[in-house]
Structure formats: C-alpha cells, structure tokens
Image (cartoon, grey):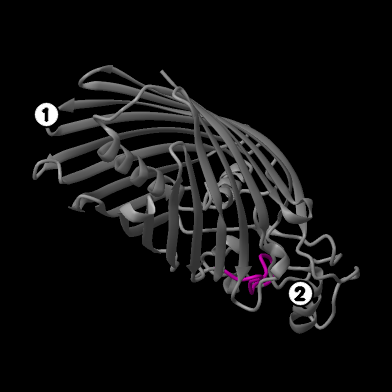
Amino acid sequence: MSKHQELTSTVRELRTSAEAVTLAVALYLLSLNRGACEDHIDYRYENYREDSGRIGVDTHSWLFEDQLLPWLSVKGLAVYDAISGATPTGGPTPTQAQSIMLNTLGYAAPGNPSDQVPLAHMSDKRWAGTMDAAFSFGPHHVTPEFSYSSEHDYLSYGAALNYSLDLNGKNTTLNLGWAHDWDTVLPARSPFLYSMEHKDTDHVLVGVNQLLGPKTVLTANLTIASARGYLSDPYRGVMFDQSDQFNLNDLILYPEKRPGHRLSYVPEITLRQYLTPLHAGVEASYRYYQDTYGIAAHTIQLAWHQKIGTFLQISPVFRYYRQSAASFYAIHFPGDFVYDPAAIPANYSSDYRLSTMETFNAGVEMSARVRPWLTIDLAYKRYEMYGLDGVTSPSAYPKANIVTVGARLWF
C-alpha cells in the first residue's frame, strides 16, 4: 500500500475498503440512475487537514456524463491529489520503546522519552481516472469500466464489468459485478522496499435493489475480494526485541510483513425512505466486514436529506466504524534477526490502521440548484479516529477537518 492509499483509506473511509465500496456504489448508481441520465460536467475540490499539521490532502476531480444514444451513455472521471505532511512510521513512542527495552534487555538506549509516535515527512502527487460506457438492451444493462492511477511509488490499472437486470416491472434490479486491479509498488523513497513488487486484486459483487413501495427502496449487496502479492506497506516498520537500539528517538525498524493473500467478505444493506409531509428523505445503512487477517468491522451510516424550498437540499450525515485488530498486529514483536530468529513470528505489522479502533465521521452537505443549468455543492465533515486496545498510543490516530466545494453544469 502506498502512502497515497494510506491517506485515501483515511480520507474516504472517507475516500475505507475502497475498491469494494466503489464497486457497490457504481452498481447502485447504475441501477437507479440509468434511463434518467442528464448530461453534465462536474468539478469538485476537497481539502483534508489533520490536526497538529500532520497530513494535508488537496483533491481536484472532474467528471462528465453524456447520454450519446438512447441505449448508450458514457462517463469519465479524472482525479488529481497533492499530499504532504507527516505520517507515523510504525514505531512505538519513545516512552513505550524505553519500557520495552527495560523489560526485554534490562536497559534502555539513551534519548528523551515522549508520548508521541515517531513521524516521517512525506509528499506525493497522484493522477487517476476512470472511463466507462453503459449499454442498455431492454431489461439488460452492461457497463465495462477501465481505470488508471499513477504516483511516484505506485502504479495501478483496473478493469471492471457490471451487469444489471430489471425484473418485476423495474421494481427489482439484480446486479452482478467483477473488477480486477493490477498494481505495481515501486521502491521510490521507501526505507523498507528495495525492488519492484506486484499485487493483484479481484472483486465480485452480487446485489439487489428492491422497490418496497412508491417511496421506499432497499439495497442489499455482498462483495467478496481477494488480493494476492505484495500486501505490506512499504512505509511501515516494526520494532523487535533486539539489542541494537541506540537512541529512543531514532529507533531501528524493520519492514513489516503481512500475509501474501487477503480474502474479505462485505455484506451491506441500505434502506432509503422518502417522507412526503416533511419533504425529506432518510437513508440508513449497515455494513459488515470480515477478512482473513482476523479483522471484523461494523459500519453504521445515517443521512437526512431535507429539501428547503424548490432548489436547496441540506443533508446532515453521520458514520460510525469499529473494527477488531489483525491477528498479526502489535506495537513491537519478539525475536532478533541475528541472535533469536526463531522467535520472530511469520507475519507482523505495527500499522495503527490494523489495530482495534473506531472512527466517527459527521457533518453536513448542502446542494443548491442556483440555475436550471448549475448546481453548487458544499460540505463540511469532522473525522476522528480512536484506538481501543489500550496499548497503541493515542497520538497515532488522526483527527481531521474535511471541506468540499463543487459545481455541476447541466447541458
């Protein structure tokens, strides 16, 4: 995982399990919006800023959608990210390192103990894009999609094929999707990666959209993902119980090692209800996640879409996420690569994102159609992550403000 992917898994947890969610959303939008497609061009700017000046991300995105023929529409998306700031290296705090060395070695390296996890400065830029074409043949709808993403240490190509079938007078839509990503991890400035590595990921989605009433829609999806290859983070290190530590404030870390295969299962259910007397709609969803890393996660999301007058909509939103830790997560590990290699576990990582934790994401979105041909979007969200294991330092977990502005031109 590149630094950018680390950030986007935070920003779009914010931008979490990103490929599976993207596939599910794409299929949902395909099934509900086809046939009512209006041609448009969108621009969106998102500013993500973590507290204490840690990580900042500026994202510019452009999207277009055009109904070329009654049975064919095309859509394209381009994204540019600029990222800079400081991110945890994976090492424990100097205070924790001092305690570990005292317990395992009987002495501690010199240095100034503190309760802040060590950070490394980073910066990067990314260009990414997707292109798809939606073909409709009666009740059958087929959408091939191609994607590309490039940054200085990561290169990704993707392909997807989505199929939807309308049944029961279009009150029921069955969805089936497949996607594959070919990723290349480049050494670049990584302190732990010395050669080019590869990763392949497959996603399969099966879902249904069911109209329960004139104003009630139920969506249920199951996504299964399988990733193989280099799944470690080239910017994350771990501390071992070894004797070659010379400074608490400059710990010697070794590359993390995650299993070479990860299988995940993601069932999700969403209910949308329009409330006529209030001129509003409510949306509630629950998502469960489980993988072969040992992580089990629950996500609850609520949104209220309130129409005010003819052209304005305000939407308070709330999202809660909680996960258990990966089976190979810890803030340090036993063993010594020279003197005690047998004690080193098969897999190990000190990436706080694999710990037991919870996140809160709450805010408000506003959309105003100021002209028949122009819609303006504004949003503010507050994102906070907290550790729950009582061991990982609270300073590892980010908190951030996210501001989004955008515009859509209809034609």
Magenta span includes 164: no
Q: Residues within 10 Å of mark 1 (few under 14, many from 20)?
A: few
Quadrant where the C terminus lies? top left
Whether residue 136 sits left or right of residue 106 in the image: it is left
The residue at the point 91 percent across, 70 percent down is: 110
Q: Secondary structure at mark 1?
A: loop
Marks 2/1: CA–CA distance? 64 Å
Residue 186 or 405: which is nearer the viewer?
Answer: 405
Q: Farthest top residue?
A: 68
Question: Residue 77 has which mark?
Answer: none
> What secondary structure is the magenta-colored segment mainly?
loop
* Residue 42 sits above or below residue 273 on the image: above
* Kind of residue at disc 1: Gly
Corner quadrant of residue 4 = top right
* Residue 253 sits above or below residue 364 on the image: below
**Residue with the mark numbered 1:** 138
* Residue 213 sits above or below residue 142 on the image: below
Specify whether residue 383 is in view. Answer: yes
Q: Which residues are magenta?
A: 329-339
The residue at the point 11 percent across, 29 percent down is: 138
- Which percent across, then down, holds residue 242? 73, 71
**Residue with the mark numbered 2:** 96
* Kind of residue at disc 2: Gln
Q: Residues within 10 Å of mark 2 (few under 14, many from 20)?
A: many
Q: Farthest left residue?
A: 168
Corner quadrant of residue 92 = bottom right
Q: Secondary structure at mark 2?
A: helix
- Which percent across, then down, holds residue 308? 47, 45
Say which label, 2 or 1, has the lower sequence index. Answer: 2
Residue 81 or 183: which is nearer the viewer?
Answer: 81
Whether residue 199 sits left or right of residue 355 in the image: it is left
